[in-house]
Amino acid sequence: MESKEKQIRDRVKKENTLAQLQEENSQIKKKNDVIKRSPVWKIGNKFLEPFVRFKKLYGRIMPQNRKSKLKALEQSNYDLECQINKLMSEIRVKEAQVILLSNDQSTEDLNKAIKLLSKEPNSLEIIDTIVNGCKMKSKSAKRTLDTIVNRFHLLKDIEQRNVVFNKLIDAYDIREIPEKIVRYSEEAIASEINSVASFKTSLVLRSTIRKKQRLTHDHILDDKSLAYQLMDVLDVRRPFRSTETFTTKTFSPENERVLKPVNSAGSRGVYIIYDETNIQRVKDTSIFQGYDELKLKMKEDVQKGFVQNDEWFLEEFIYDRERHKPAKDLKFYCFYGRVGLVLEIERFPNIKYCWWDSSGCKVHTGKYEDQLFAGEGFTKDEIELVKKLSAELPVPFMRIDFLKTSTEFVFGEFTPKPGNYNEFNEKTDQLLGEMYLEAEYKLIDDLIKGKEFSHFKEIYQKVTAFQADIESHSKEDM
């Protein structure tokens, strides 16, 4: 592991050093070009021609010791310039480190500092220093908090203790909350203490399980073909999908289709093909034309890691013909039969967002605050259908995405891990975290009472049987 990390560090150092030298060379060339194009240079060059010829002649007859002295002075000047540039670079790096470790930095300052450091040859070593500095600050803060807990948990004044613990519980990392705080927070008399529930923490823990278990229940439904099988069983409208997948080499475009990668997240690698002259990249709503250009962008998506594998499929394009534009997205954040949030997205002509709670009231979540629009929301029948679907899934959380036109409400996909979920504000994160924990409890309770999840189980058994068959064949080949 250490050897691998050293290889990565060495590679990054070489790449960044080369990039710096190329940038310096490029800047020098640009300055030279600007000087040579200037009228002063052109006039001066003509005027100085006789002097240049004289210098060349004088150079031939100049004593050797004077030539060597001049050369030595030029080299010394160059060395001094290099030292100055190096020192200036070191000063900029130190300033960036100070910004990153200070407590009052702005987001803009942070971005500038990280951008500068990422280009340094020793960028990974610098990041190590910054991370270690943050850890030291965190450990120091924890010691302070622990000392406060040890003093105030002995207080007989329960109201005063609760006020203190209410502040402390927000300051702690959730993994380090002392047992003393947890003990008192469970008491009815200390019910004022804030909840430590967190949606992002729950999803991180869920992701940890997913790494240890090859086949988790929510991961199964992340597969579009299996999700569509479940929709067919439940008689829910979903788009037509090509039965075969293809690569960038075997891709044969079709008009009025949506091109999607088999594995991706957050609309990465998704394209709407109206026709050859009108193709839209969903992620940034940019428009371009030509199937050759589309194939180039598909290759870039794979090379840059936006799409995991060069494996794609075509899907029916759900179009709102009455309004002459693509269907809206409605993304329901579902917690085993309950809806916590709904995100409405309009992608044409520019991408815009609107957040709703389950009762149809607009809310602010901290995400997309500069791209909000009025939105139209959803009907009672639509949200009831989504709740019913969510209750059919033996998982505490699943985002269920639909496409909505003036006349249709069409299933899109299941999303077990929404993109950028860490950007929710504290209030939203806590609310969804509480719903996650409540859904976990209710799910276990229903399983104990004998709920079978028959529709899901049918698909689950097919997948596990297929997986077992693959593993048995692999063992036979060995």
Image: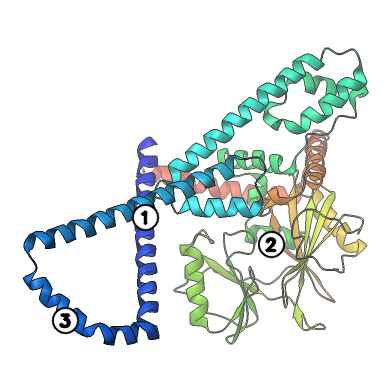
Position in image of residue 323 (x %, y %): 81, 82
Give whichever of 417, 422 is nearer the camera.
Answer: 422
Would residue 61 appear left or right of 397 to someone viewing this image? left
For disc 2, the marked residue is 228
* Mark 2 to mark 3 CA distance (whole Å): 82 Å
Q: Secondary structure at mark 1?
A: helix
Quarter the C terminus occupies: top left
**Which label was assigned to residue 53?**
3
For disc 1, the marked residue is 15
Q: Secondary structure at mark 2?
A: helix
2 and 3 marks in contact (CB < 8 Å) = no
Q: Secondary structure at mark 3?
A: helix
Position in image of residue 226 (x %, y %): 65, 57
Q: Which quarter of the picture shows residue 162? A: top right
Crowding around mark 1 (Cα neighbors within 10 Å: few <14, some 14 to 19, many 20+) is some
In the depicted structure, whether residue 302 falls above or below residue 115: below
* Mark 1 to mark 3 CA distance (whole Å): 43 Å
Give whichever of 197, 50 is nearer the camera.
Answer: 50
How is the model colour-coded? Answer: rainbow
Q: Which quarter of the picture shows residue 328? A: bottom right
Crowding around mark 3 (Cα neighbors within 10 Å: few <14, some 14 to 19, many 20+) is few
Quarter the N terminus occupies: top left
In this orientation, does residue 310 appear?
Answer: no
